[in-house]
Image (cartoon, rainbow, N blue to C red):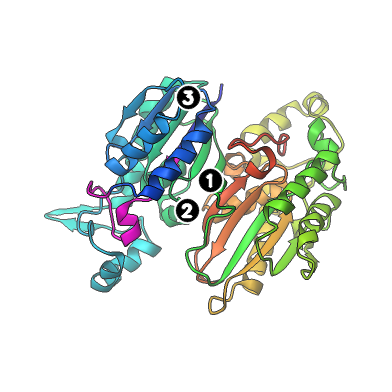
Amino acid sequence: MTTKVVIVRHGQSSYNVEHIIQGRCDKSVLTDKGRADAEKVGGVLRQLEVATLYCSPLQRAKTTAEVIHNCFEVAPPLEVSDLLKEVDLPLWEEMKKDDVVRQFPEDYQTWKTRPDEFYMQVGDTKHYPVLSLYEQAQTFWKTVIAKHAGETIVIVAHNGINRCLISSAIGVPPARYHSIQQSNCCINVLNFKGGWGEAVELESLNQTSHLGSVLPPPRKNKGVRLLLIRHGETDWNKESRFQGKIDIPLNKTGREQGQKAATFLKETPLDFAISSPMLRPKETAEIILSYHSGVKLEIKEKLLEISHGKWEGKLKPEVQTEYPELLKQWQETPELVQMPEGENLQQVWDRAVECWQEIVAEQGDASEEMKTGIVVAHDAINKVILCALLGLSPSNFWNVKQGNGAVSVIDYSDGKDGAPVLQAINITSHLTGGIFDQTAAGAL
């Protein structure tokens, strides 16, 4: 029984505009834009059957939640939780970011590069803001998830706590705190398959299209932006038939999904394009490039889909009959599975991540104006790349969803030697018009 959790960051605040560090200071209020964007979120969420709407007590989040709450015809209960307060940065609150950088250069560098090690000396106590916030997020999940089995809940909170809620749910370590982007009034979706400690899937991260922003804006206009895209649907996706390295083309729905992705990215300038050599991603890429005539498609062999070996061409019930224990293991501990006469996840991980790093090295010059390119591949390939970027392992394969025609956004604003920022994961709003992924099942 799946519990769906929709996580929203508060709208633009007065301190956001002034580039003042907020933390747990409660003087910052929503701007007119912040209120207008909150109404847009409310217009999307009012269509859902929500059991409870939880929010932080800090007024920028609480007001955002109240605006959203007022959009419902039949409003769910609104519950304020101290466990949703923002990261506690007592020595920096109400300071402008530039002043912090100037006055605390070493501490700020640690905060940005090793957030799990960063601490503030408060009296006789060493306060670790990120580690403390991560623990706070875990406490919230333990308190709340058991109450809402099979229901949908909405959380309205802050940049930092949202990052820790998402990270702690799917296993992203605190060291990757800055790897996850949260735009004002963005929408994230998590699927809890059971109680706390059981499987959790990140369905989407940092959706912003409901705000009129096709893709989240980059933090700097330098380096490289990679748009990681899964191919459109095939008949075998629709049938839940294992494809692997069998070269199945797109079906009618898949071509339509490719066209919707093309329209979605039509106004996004592209500098390069890369695809797996297989028909389904290659055709998806070619449809997208119909609006970018000057961009040549490059093929990378290492982006080939996982080889399912003897499972390829078989329906899930057939594999269930012939390989019941191995299929169960694939669904529960995929990192331990050697596909019969096929690959294991570590082999796929090694070649996909190596290919990704080669692309970043080729395109990610931090001294140049930002380049943007598409990388079109497969469910398993995309999942292992995203897991690697989040600091996860092959055991987390099922924690990240990839829908047919979905777009993920990864920025290297500091170039190939800098840390990646996951600006968005699994955007599918251009396919359905809604916030939930309704595409065919992923890798079985």
**Quadrant of the drawing holding the C terminus:** top right
Rendering coords of residue 98 (x, y %): 30, 69
Q: Nearer the viewer, residue 440 or 341?
A: 440
Rendering coords of residue 188 (x, y %): 51, 41
The residue that mark 2 highlights is 181
Q: Residues within 10 Å of mark 3 (few under 14, many from 20)?
A: many
Badge 1 or badge 3: first in the primary sequence? 3
Residue in the picture at 43% in, 41% down = 38
Whether residue 126 is situated above or below residue 415 in the rendered picture = above
In the displayed structure, does residue 242 sit left or right of residue 123? Answer: right
Q: Nearer the viewer, residue 441 or 95?
A: 95
Q: Residues within 10 Å of mark 2 (few under 14, many from 20)?
A: many
In the displayed structure, does residue 154 sit left or right of residue 94? Answer: right
Q: Is residue 13 magenta?
A: yes
Q: Amino acid at mark 1?
A: Leu
Q: Secondary structure at mark 3?
A: loop
- What is the number of the mark on residue 205? 1
The residue that mark 3 highlights is 50
Q: How many numbered circles are shown?
A: 3
Q: Can you see residue 428? A: no
Rendering coords of residue 153 (x, y %): 46, 28
Rendering coords of residue 253 (x, y %): 81, 39
Give, as a single range, the part of the protein colored magenta.
8-28
Q: Would you identify the image quadrant in which residue 355 lies?
A: bottom right
